[in-house]
Amino acid sequence: MAKFVLPSSSDKVPYIGALQPVDLGSQTLTTTGFGSFDGVKIFAPESSTNTVVGNGAGTSIAAGALNNTIIGRSAGASLTTSNNNVLIGAFAGKNVDGLDNLMLGSLAGEFANGAGATRNVYMGTWAGLGTDDASNTAGDNVGLGWRSLRRVEDGDKNLALGSNTCQALTTGSRNSVIGYSAGLLLTTGGNNILIGHDAAEDLTTGNQNIIIGNDVDTSAVDASFELNIGNLLKGTRTGHGSGETLGIPFDNAPFYFGVDGILNSYIQWTGSALEIVVVEDDMDLVFKVNDGAVERSITWNADVDQLEHSAGVFNWDDDFLMIAAEKIQFRDTAIGIYSQADTFLDLFADGGVRIGDSSGGAPTTYIEFEANGDMFWVGAGSGLPFGNMYIATEVVVDITTNNPTEVFDATDDGWTIGDLNLVTFPTGGDEHFLTVEKGGEYHIAWSMSMSTVTGGANVEVEGGVMVNGASAASGRAHRTIATTTDTGAMCSSTFLRLSANDEISLFVLNESNFTNIAVAHATLTIHMVGG
């Protein structure tokens, strides 16, 4: 039984087990040796720099332990040689043998185990309690509030402020959690920022989330890389630079940009469209893209009400779809493009629509569709393919068989080139046919006046069109030459489907004898009428 030594005054209190006189305010007690009173022990073991108060408190302190303050039943019971711990409360830091811990409250940090439990701050009943497991070596944690970090084992560098915050956390690290029951069920998740009453209370294993607001939660208990601020601003990220999203999830909820307190522009989702609204007069709207080398921008110029591109050109790499009969208009409402029905494309202009060679300035070669429906071409070499050749000086065709013979003079051909477009006329001694460059349906018309070179009455002569040296079945004509002094004329026309590089010429056929035919005049004209 301890000895009690009382001062001379009867109102003095006993001091039990002091090794030297201690000043307790206005009361001075005298040392008598170690003692106890009603289950409380007050002593300074092994070193005068340690203060220990409580039954079973600091019972393992050994030489070398410095600057520890331990108050409460069994508080710091396992601490041996560690320094700078403040453990106050029944069972506070009972198993701790680490450095620089502050644990205030009944059962605060009770199972924080061994030398690994270092630099922790636990304040509140059951704060940082841990589990009865040798792996409870968590360090650098701050848990302030009833049951905050209650089950922590080896999760490091966590901040939990508020009753019940992160009360289920075991191995998760680097979480910053503020608010009553915030991160309530979080166990192994790390690197989360959770702020607000019941913020992310259902999250368990997710990582790197930012959740702010009362009762605001993640999309799933294991969600990671999510942002949710008040259920108003949301975002996700699956990896740096890829799969990133940021959203404002409410219909008709504007996202404002203000100047001097004036809401002069904002972005708004209406439920069916995303609107970018600029309220102020003469305020341009600019979209910029910079690939690291070149900056490009698209600007709505409020001064002239037009869209402008910094490079002067708009490029689309994908389909551009207008789903209704809306118009793209130019200069005024009388000029533009639209689709009146889903099977038509309509171009309209009150003066006319021109399609041609112009990329700036007035075109010089083009097709024009006037507002009244008239159509014509302007400029040389324009329009559909066409060609013409003719004989102006008599050509004698040498007849050697009763088969069709091409009309040309063996000496000088005799044909002269006319107007051509996408049709050629050869040079160099073979000048008696036209060659088409484009395949398609052609209208061919011809005429010829001729006579026989030598005698013979009632000579039957036939004429027509040849394609690549073979007579065509259609487009033929017939004439009877009565005498050698008789000059007859014949003509015909037809439609033929031609291929590119086909050669078109005329033939004559003497059905009566082998008398040569003299062609005084002839004309061959072709033009494309279809594909």
Image (cartoon, rainbow, N blue to C red):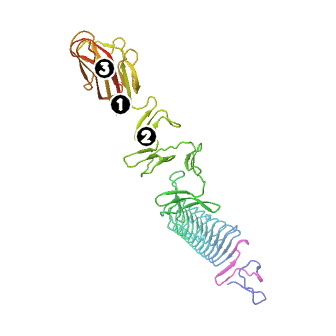
Residue 313 is situated, as x and y percent measured from the top left of the image, at: 53, 42
Q: Is residue 468 visible?
A: no
In the figure, residue 427 lies in which quadrant?
top left
The three-letter code of the residue at mark 1 reads Met
Q: Mark 2 and mark 3: span between their CA atoms?
A: 38 Å
Between residue 213 and residue 334, name the one nearer to us.
334
- Residue type indicated by callout 2: Glu
The majority secondary structure of the magenta stretch comes to: loop
Q: Which residue sits at x=73%, y=71%?
A: 49
Q: Which residue is mark 1?
A: 528
Residue identifier under label 3: 448
Seen in the image, is 436 located left or right of residue 482? right
Q: Nearer the viewer, mark 1 or mark 3?
A: 3
Q: Which label's residue is closer to the chain start, 1 or 3?
A: 3
Q: Amino acid at mark 3?
A: Met
In the image, residue 243 sits, relative to residue 157, either above or below, namely above
- Furthest residue in direction right, as rendered: 8
Residue 458 part of the magenta segment:
no
